[in-house]
Image (spheres, rainbow, N blue to C red):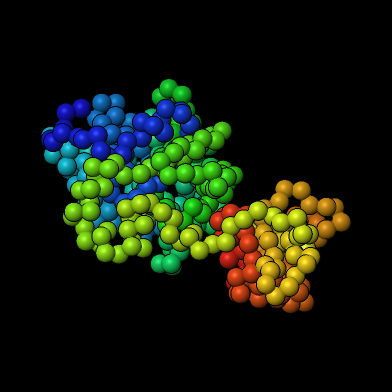
């Protein structure tokens, strides 16, 4: 499709990910390679212009839906479109968490908030759906943002319903984009992603998903260094924004289970079993505990959980007395004497720490 200005080859496209033909597609990268721009123009608007296949645009909270957000999407499209595009919507629907956005009276995309009840999310299906997109998927916990409860499950349930309206070839595809504040997020946990195998500039492929950790093209990187002084003089920000480093994960202690450790107890949190292994030969200079997800648990072992929703056979809610037994473990966390298999385990333990 002809554009107002030429599109260069320095910015991000989904071609590499699409080559693996998976229903769930994820791209994370430094800031400014053009993930959002490419998605709205190449993935959503151009196909809609030809076939009128509307998309669903996911947001996490209903409060994110506002005029500024929709105006930003309109500006992105008009940056390339020869014909001026004017998006139409009803402001009064913002608070409801579902908003239809149209062009010349025809549905272009439907905004759906993950914070509304699951039944309403599933009922938000649209005929002849073109795809599903969620931008800025990875949050930064340091700014007090939070993922939705059972977020991955909600997305799977929505997909199972929405795919029935898909009339194209193959299967309905979902696209997620974000900046890697951290490699921990609900989708990676649900997909059982081996975090240690994620590499900058490479693609990680699973049974139903594909993840690209994109990097900046050298020419684009050079241009950005010239235009933004923060990239030159703020090393931490440079690592995140220009190099795409998961800065929140940098200081997490990651390692393999040493032979001298034995399973001390098992905690269950958000449907995952976490084995807490204790060092059998502790001295003042050694780490005390090691944590990793485990699949099999001895029938003789009790699993402690923190929420009724996590209860199953052989699990019990943690009592006050049992919380006291975990104080040594909590103290070891405080003193950084705990090593983790990967960042997913660390962030689960971080939440558990608040409940001990």
Residue 226 can be seen, yes or no: yes
Residue drawn at point x = 13 percent, y = 36 percent? 5
Quadrant including the C terminus: bottom right
- Residue 215's place in the image compared with 63, above or below, is above
**Front residue of 270 and 98:** 270
- Residue 107's place in the image compared with 153, above or below, is above
Residue 318 rendering spot, x and y as whole percentages = 73, 69
**Front residue of 15 and 128:** 15
**Front residue of 176 and 59:** 176
Occupied quadrant, residue 241: bottom left
Q: Is residue 261 left or right of residue 229?
A: right
Residue 207 rendering spot, x and y as whole percentages = 56, 33
Residue drawn at point x = 29 percent, y = 26 percent? 51
Q: Is residue 17 left or right of residue 266?
A: left
Q: Is residue 152 left or right of residue 318?
A: left
- Residue 287's place in the image compared with 210, above or below, is below
Residue 85 can be seen, yes or no: no
Quadrant including the N terminus: top left
Residue drawn at point x = 54 percent, y = 35 percent? 206
Residue drawn at point x = 46 percent, y = 28 percent? 21
Occupied quadrant, residue 174: top left
Extreme-right residue of the structure = 300
Residue 54 rendering spot, x and y as whole percentages = 33, 35
- Count the labels in the image: 0
Q: Is residue 264 left or right of residue 234?
A: right
Residue 262 rendering spot, x and y as whole percentages = 78, 59
């Amino acid at each position: 499709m002809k554009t107002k200005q030429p599109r260069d080859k320095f910015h991000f496209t989904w071609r590499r990910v699409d080559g693996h033909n998976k229903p769930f597609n994820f791209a994370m990268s430094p800031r400014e390679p053009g993930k959002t721009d490419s998605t709205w123009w190449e993935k959503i608007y151009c196909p809609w212009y030809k076939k009128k296949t509307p998309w669903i645009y996911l947001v996490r909270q209903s409060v994110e839906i506002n005029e500024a957000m929709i105006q930003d999407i309109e500006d992105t499209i008009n940056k390339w479109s020869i014909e001026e595009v004017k998006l139409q919507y009803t402001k009064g629907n913002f608070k409801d968490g579902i908003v239809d956005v149209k062009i010349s009276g025809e549905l272009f995309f439907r905004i759906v908030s993950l914070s509304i009840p699951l039944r309403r999310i599933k009922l938000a299906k649209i005929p002849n759906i073109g795809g599903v997109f969620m931008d800025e998927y990875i949050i930064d916990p340091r700014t007090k943002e939070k993922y939705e409860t059972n977020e991955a499950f909600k997305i799977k349930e929505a997909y199972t319903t929405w795919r029935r309206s898909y009339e194209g070839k193959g299967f309905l595809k979902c696209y997620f984009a974000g900046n890697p504040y951290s490699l921990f997020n609900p989708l990676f946990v649900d997909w059982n992603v081996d975090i240690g195998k994620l590499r900058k500039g490479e693609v990680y492929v699973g049974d139903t998903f594909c993840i690209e950790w994109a990097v900046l093209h050298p020419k684009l990187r050079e241009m950005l260094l010239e235009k933004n002084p923060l990239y030159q003089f703020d090393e931490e920000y440079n690592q995140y924004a220009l190099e795409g480093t998961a800065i929140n994960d940098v200081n997490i202690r990651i390692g393999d289970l040493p032979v001298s450790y034995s399973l001390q107890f098992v905690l269950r949190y958000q449907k995952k079993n976490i084995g807490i292994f204790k060092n059998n030969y502790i001295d003042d200079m050694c780490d005390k505990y090691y944590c990793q997800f485990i699949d099999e648990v001895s029938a003789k072992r009790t699993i402690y959980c923190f929420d009724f929703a996590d209860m199953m056979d052989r699990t019990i809610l943690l009592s006050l007395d049992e919380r006291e037994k975990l104080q040594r473990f909590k103290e070891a966390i405080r003193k950084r004497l705990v090593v983790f298999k990967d960042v997913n385990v660390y962030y689960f333990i971080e939440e558990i720490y608040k409940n001990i």
